[in-house]
Amino acid sequence: MRQRANRLSSSKKLLTTTAVGVAVVLGLSACAPGSAASTSGGQTLVIGMESEAGALDPQSPAGWVTWRVDYQIYDTLVTEDLSKSSEEAPVTELKPGLASSWTVSPDGLVYTFTIRDANFTDGTPVDAAAVEYNVRRMWDPASPQYSPQAAGSSVYLWQNLADVSSDGQTLTLTMAQPFSPFLRLLAGIGGGGIISPAALEKYGDEGIGDNPVGSGPFKFVDRVRGERITLERNDDYWGDVPELDRVVFRPLPDASARVAALRSGDVDIIAVPSPDSVAGLVDEGYQLSEGTPPHVWFLRFNFDNEYTKNKLVRQAINLAIDREGMAEDLLQGTANPAYDIQAPANDAYVERTDAYTRNLEEAKALLAEAGYPDGFTTTLTTSTDGSGQIVPVPMAEYIQQNLAEVGIDVKIDATEWTSYLGTYFQGTPDDVGLAQLSWGMTSPYWLYTQTSSSLIAPNGPNVGYYSNPELDAVMGQAISATDDAAATELWKQANEIATEDAVFAPIVNDKAPYILAPNVRGFVSASEEWYDLTNVSLD
Amino acid sequence: MTALITRRVVSTLLVLLGVSVVVFLLVQLVPGDPARVILGQNATPAAIAEVRQALGLDKPIVVQFMDYLGGLLRGDLGTSLIVNSPVIDIVLPRFMNTLILAGAALIICVGVGVPLGLLAAKKQYSVFDRASMFISMTGASVPVYWMALLLIGFFGLTLGWFPTSGMYDSREPGGLPDLLLHLVLPAVAAALVPLAVIARMTRSVTLEVLEQDYVRTLRASGLPESTILWRHALRNALPQIVTVIGLQVGYLLGGVIFVEVVFGWPGLGGQLYTSISQRDMPTIQAGVLFIAVVFVAVNLLADISVGVLDPRSRKQAVA
Amino acid sequence: MTATLQKARRVEMPPVSGGMEHEGPSRFRLAVRAYVRDKAAVVALIVLVLVVLAAMLAPFLTPYSPTEGSASERLQGIGTPGHPLGLDGQGRDVLSRILYGGRNSLVAGVVPVVVVFPIALTIGLLAGYAKGRVGEVLMRILDVIFAFPLVLLAIAIAAVFGAGLGNVMIAVGITLVPYLARVAYTATVQETGKDYVEAARAAGATVPQILWRELLPNVVSPLVVYATTLCGLTIVVTAGLSFLGIGVVPPTPDWGIMTSDGGKVLLEGYVYLAAIPGTVILIVSLAFNLIGDGLRDALDPRKQTS
Amino acid sequence: MTTPTPPAKTGSPATAPVLEIRDLSVEFATDSGTVRAVDHVDLTVEKGGILGLVGESGSGKSVTALCILGLIGSRRAKITSGEVRFQGEDLLTKTERQMRDVRGGRIGLVSQNALSALDPSFRIGDQLIEVIRLHQHVDKATAARIALDSLDIVALPDAARRMRSYPHELSGGQRQRVVIAIALACRPQLLIADEPTTALDATVQQQILDLLLDINKNLGTSMLMVTHDFGVVAHMCTTVAVMRKGRIVEQGEAGEIISFPRQPYTQGLMNAVPRLRLSETERAVPRSQRRLPVFVEESAFAERADYATV
Amino acid sequence: MQPSDTFLEVRDLHKSYPAKKGLGKHVDFVAVDEISFEIERGETWGLIGESGSGKTTTGRMVMALEKPTGGVVTLGGVDVTRMAGTELRRFRKRMQIVFQDSGSTFNPRRSVGDQIAFSIVRHGVVESDRTRSRVVELLERVGLTEAHYDRYIHELSGGQRQRLGICRALATEPDFLLLDEPTAALDVSVQAQILNLLKDLQAERGLTMLLITHDLSLVEYMCNRAGVLDKGKLVEQGDVDDLFTHPRSAVTRTLLDAVLDPTLPAPDPTIDRSTQ
């Protein structure tokens, strides 16, 4: 995968990026008051998660649920500012993490990080060598610590890396070609978390997940599988020391059980409340916290399908779907209608209400123009459950009813989540016009993963067999751009092309609602799938 | 007697061997690729191939089975696809929790079901008999998870008597009292169906016993009905009741999955639920194996205690 | 020694003066009469017939589709005009879903039992009569399947085959084999030890004749009774599998799915959504149990008195 | 036609009878209506006497015997008239609690199925001790001693060791001895023996009957012997009552009735049985030409009789 | 005894069951120990014994329902113990059995007529279209009627069940009938009828019968010759009149003493005891 690098020749723009401004902000917030609650001593926050977390190894394959715990334990070199809500900052800002600063060479090939003077919670120092050790675990098959699982899960992050070296607190990463999404990818899930090499040596690949050691704001205490993961404050944290003494993550896979646990006071925060419980809970005085994470619940068109390969049909379908109705009625306002392929939590977001607002007349006209005045029959595949899928079947049924209004007869083929993922990534069968999934990143690079002709299934997530040389070219330029602003512009351009061609039908963006007990303070829903707990306290 | 036990133990071991074969085959039959399960959305063909090799999935199936059996004998049940740690570490603690829950439920089943059945038999055709049998028949027809939710709603939320989830308090995990408090609702929910079955079986077995000739001898000796029921009828019905209880343990171990999910009980059932949705086959394999082993063992135990309970089989008479 | 000596027991006859009927009513009529004596079983049968009819005639009983609804009308309770049982979370008519759902739930409950019945009967008969090595091997194989708790095995098999009504039925069916076969086996062993089998052998009957003419009628009866009660259990188990996401796939209407969907909002106060299908499952499974009890009497010639 | 004959005084001291049954009727509700199983029956057991109650299956003899102990037990049975006077008290008016003292304490029962009359799950000794302690309110050791005495009375070999045996470890005859020991443990004034030797071999039957005779002689226990066999009556009874279809057809001193049966039914019962010891004239007929007299025809179809087996 | 027309011959018949006593030590349990006797054509031979004496096992071996561990049984010159499979099934036409409890030998879920008809069809006794009328003839012969044909066994009284048992045994027109305690569970009046019936049938059809019983008076009534079985051994055999008047073995004497005759005037213990 690393070898299959983007072949666009690098541009010559020179730019050095520093993060001084961000550091200032950090310094200010460190002095901010908020110690009032911490006098009470034993502050323990209990979070009801929607499912059991996986291994607490940030470099092994895992979903958001796991990463939400990892995020509290591990630092990444670069991180996002999650202290601002989505309203304040629709797109999260990058800020220094374990790297206090960094430079990028003008050709965009060499990244030099200055590693912060910090310690892992096992007492070993954080230095560039430690970070290099982590990188080689994911990237270098020749290194003793190499793990295929870690490599497989971080493939997009390290695909262009050519070399890594360390010297004291300085880490140098050399790319085979410019890769503009790199910093944002570093901040996210999929390989960014830095583990104590001593702990990795001690516990090994299999043990580290149960004995996680990082340098984050909380340190791991214990884990009773299926029952709880307990973290406690890292008093020696290099950044803001959290106000909470302890955080307990409890897996409660059943939505009703989560709500019941919140009501009975067993937990303070719950994720993914069932939409129907939200209004009642708010009435009872519970707090609702929502954001706009990089999440798109969308349909993929199959470009091998007789009907959906027709652009007019794709546009007609887009126009026939009632996104407002779904968000408000079916989902009770827990999601926003999606007006772009990219999520709003993304620099390349372009709101295209013109392309996506419901218009049945126009949809019918387009269908007639395409030669299907009476509509046609096709299949929509989706899962019955799954991470981020909200309530896939009722949503699919909703779309089924919308499309029936323009004469399109949709058959729903719903399978259980893991089998669905398996078949989804094998590519969409010819007779299936629409395949649903929810996904998204704060990096616009996400568009590339979905539409590049080099990533057509089964070689990548482009399961609709979309291939557009024009789009490929623009995205290639965006990836190798060395100027952030220029890259963003290119991504927006790519975005427009995809929208115009109606590659997808984005439906909704999840608001990722959390319900908090009345006494929870300082919880912020930022434009990300995970959250920062350093500022959270209990009354 | 000794011969009988030996024979039963040997046949149980054979059954267990069969069980492990079935469990292994179960995984082989699952469509889809464990490597794909591991890597999820980020999977690329190269990464998948690499992971497959790391897991030994590229070996012939017979070799895989021998590896699996060898592992079993060493107590190695494989590595979880999702959590990347030895399955035994995941399954064993949760299995213990399931045993706690199932054990508590069993105590309720036996403690309530047997007396209920005895009394119903004693008062055959009375209002008490008909009512308790109707209720227990109803109990056997109620979907467990539905009952569990009702219990949560009423005793957990409306009355607030019991916690609704987990095994211990989240903030200050207490010792045994805390555990017992958390145990009440899930144990009751899990006990319901087996309780109904045990009550019905106890009733019919007791009725049979009460028709025996020796009961008339006992009555003619002037023994009070209560002594006849609780001492003699129970004692004679016990072997059959124990057999039924042994079989109900199977239902308990299977049905407990619903209870664990709804009550967030960190047991094997909840783990299986998670593992099934994650297609974590080694964990499913181990979990199913554990439960099957317990079930087989419990029934072996039931068989043996039936032998001990019945004086007639204690000394095998020469035919 | 045969046990005949012990078995001989004086049965005191009542002082009878009644004459004899020349032509008694047919066996079938007698069986019906024995069944009818059990009032609960009669009510249960009527209820079940009504439920089956309602499921078959669903399109005539309700104007609404079981899979389509309007999200703007969601979650309206019992007594909503036009929707006597209310609307569910997708604004679908609950009554329609109950009626159409009956088709799936009843099929899921009955078909596995009906399909497995002859298989289990054959296994049980052969194993029970052959005893010896063949019987031993057959029963050991069944023991292996039996070692897995019913729900768990159904879950595991459903996990292998994937979700869907058909797969669930296969899973449940496989799980039921050892249960039914055991009953058939036990009955066969018990009957084989009885004098009439020996008498048939003494009369020169061949093995197939003994199996078919002597044992079968005596083994089938308890098996039918047991199978009937199993139908109730399968409906509940199938419903449970749907709850775990490995049963019937939405939007297919099915009582299990409806109960589990309804369960999600049970604690939000929408009790009716789970209570209605839950009650229907309860009633039907109860009906199967009671019918089983009634059949026990009806199929017992000793209870078939005129 | 039922004329209750006053008990013959020959050889027995003139004292008040132990048991007097007057006008007893019992009805059973069956599917096909009410059946009167016991029809205005009068019976008397003299103190120290043995009354044989003889009849075929369904004649109501067992039901009559069980009525005395209040053990008809079936919900379908109902005593519609009469009284059962035991030592002057009417047992039918007693409460269940009072009856418990009578049962096992003052009246013992030896029931017909020797093989199944003992609780298979308890040791012989424990079953005896339980009854003894119930009625005599003594400690366990004393009860054990009394139990052992009882087993000695019934001549159970190796009684001390047998106390620790389970019923299945004993032979049929031994079991019946234990049943008798239980019935006798509290020295009842009356022993009801309901076909005590059915299912026992002929030799064992004789031993048991002789045991009962010894008990009658040595302990003075009065007995009600329910049987279908005139051989048994001839062997041990002082008086006899012949029952048919719920009624007493003939009653009187045993020797007299056996020698001169007045009722054809009684004659039939006696003559229908093949006899081992034949007179010379009987023996003169070739075996192939000998015939047993048949005195009653079976009903065409049996009716359900489960009520009668209480 | 004059040179006889032997129909059934039992020679050195032996049956032992392997039994485990303790661990490892095998002590075989001998049920029938080398017994020999002969039955003449048309005769009723009595086999006397108490429970556990081995008489039922002997009967089962004679009927080839059980394999002896030694010895032979010849019936009409044919060695029964050597037969198996179809040959044996065909041979069963010639020998039939009447059990103590004929009720239990009828399948509770099939009509009794059908079951009797089966024997007739199975052995091709008459043309198949005559089967039913043949069964009815037999029913009537044993004192039942056509109305009983479609009945189920539980609907009939003990005496009727026994008649049916006899009826089925006769269906194949056998030469030999084994009677295993045929009246032990019957009331005296019914017992008399059955015994008379058996006698009549024997005379009618020239049946050879083996009567197994513990009741000496039955043997006295039915048999000219008999043998006494004790603990698997045939302790004595011979002419009944002789056997019962001059018993040579202790067992026989005990058995004789145990018989209670109602009309025996001499040793009436009742009067003795009650006067003392």
Image (cartoon, rainbow, N blue to C red):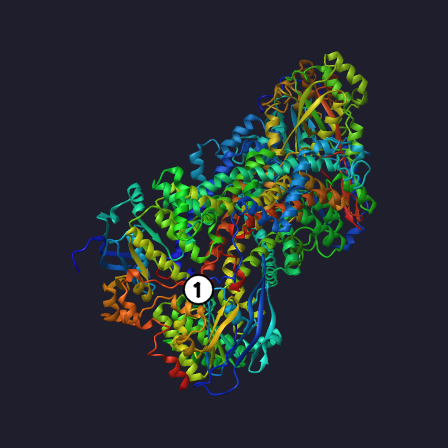
Name the subunit of mark 1.
Answer: B
Which of C54/A452 is in front? C54
The reply to whether residue A348 is visible in this rendering is: no
Give the residue at x 57% y 34%: C167
Above or below: residue E69 compared with residue A72? below
Count the labels in the image: 1
In the visual, does E169 lie left or right of A179? Answer: left
Of all residues shown, which one is farthest toward the left? Answer: E3
* Residue annotated with mark 1: B311
Above or below: residue D116 compared with residue A393? below
Secondary structure of the residue carrying tag 1 is helix
In the visual, does A250 lie left or right of E233? Answer: right
In the visual, does A189 lie left or right of A150? Answer: right
Circle 1 packing at 10 Å, graded few (<14), some (14-19), many (20+), is: some
In the visual, does C207 lie left or right of A291? Answer: left
Q: Amino acid at mark 1?
A: Pro
Q: Position of residue A463 (x, y in %)?
A: 63, 23
Which of A81/A315 is in front? A315
Q: Position of residue D127 (x, y in %)?
A: 48, 72
Q: Position of residue E172 (x, y in %)?
A: 34, 46
The reply to whether residue D131 is visible in this rendering is: yes
Q: Position of residue D279 (x, y in %)?
A: 30, 71
Q: Quadrant of the N terminus of chain E?
A: bottom left
Which of D124/C187 is in front? C187
Quarter-wise, where is residue B5 in the image? bottom left
Q: Quadrant of the C terminus of chain E?
A: bottom left
